Amino acid sequence: MSCAAVKTTAPSVHSSAKPDATVNPCTLCAPLGAALATAGVRGAIPLLHGAQGCATYIRRYLISHFREPMDVASSSFGEAQTVFGGEDNLGRALDNVLKQYRPELVTVATTCLAETIGDDVPLLLTRYRTRTGSALPLVHAATPSYKDGTSRGSIPWCTPWSKSLACDQGTPLRAVNLLPPLVSPADLPPPP
């Protein structure tokens, strides 16, 4: 068959004023939701237990979104931690955060890598507290992106925050805290 005998058709191009669908890749990152939720707590620093790239991506996204600096710490996994676990890196990361920032609270969110290899972060945090004698509140939640996205990344924090920060002292306030998932104007439909 010769080339002249092959009929070709031009590909059809769909043009529309409105795209059929859009996907914001940032909505797929649960640790991003955890870091964003942490940003709303005075004196808190988010620490991502996993690869450095995760923290870099989230830091870059938050800085470009809010147009101001934001700190996101990382336990900075490498190949060895991927195989043998990240306990030593988590301890060093916590030491660095405590020394540099003197936070009132550290939230430890796990990334996909830490969850996939099975790091037992509650156990690692207990060992860290025992070894250092630190009384600083360390709140942990599992936030792998393959389980939930950004908007759901903030939800796992509600119970750990309540358990670690609530106290039975003083007069109870007649107030309610609303902890919505990540919502932006882009999530709302345009007015009719």
Image (cartoon, helix red, strand yellow):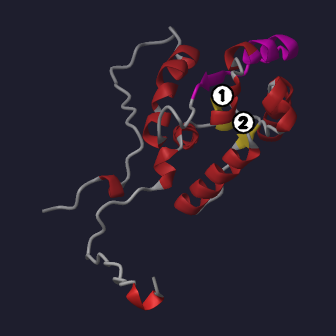
Marks 1/2: CA–CA distance? 10 Å
What residue lies at 45% left-to-right and 82% top-to-bottom?
1
Report whether 86 appears left or right of 61: right
- Residue furthest to the bottom in view is 4
Residue 111 seen in this snapshot: no
- When asked about the image quadrant of residue 15, the answer is bottom left
Residue 157 position in % (x across, y down): 52, 27
What residue lies at 79% left-to-right and 40% top-to-bottom?
76
What residue lies at 33% left-to-right and 20% top-to-bottom?
174
Residue pointed to by mark 1: 116
Residue 4 position in % (x across, y down): 42, 91
Residue 179 seen in this snapshot: yes
What residue lies at 58% left-to-right and 56% top-to-bottom?
61
Q: Residues within 10 Å of mark 1 (few under 14, many from 20)?
A: few
Residue 59 position in % (x across, y down): 65, 52
Contact between marks 1 and 2 (CB within 8 A): the answer is no
Q: Is residue 131 magenta?
A: yes
Frontmost residue, 112 versus 55 = 112
The local secondary structure at tag 2 comes to loop
- In the rendered structure, which disc, 1 or 2, sits on the residue that comes first in sequence? 2
Residue 9 position in % (x across, y down): 34, 82
Report whether 102 appears left or right of 158: right
- Residue furthest to the top in view is 168
Frontmost residue, 10 versus 124 = 10
- When asked about the image quadrant of residue 101, the answer is top right
Q: Is residue 101 magenta?
A: no
Residue pointed to by mark 2: 50
Please state the extent of the stretch shown in magenta in the rendering: 124-142
Tell me which amino acid carries mark 2: Gly
Picture layout, residue 190 above or below residue 164: below
Frontmost residue, 164 versus 147 = 147
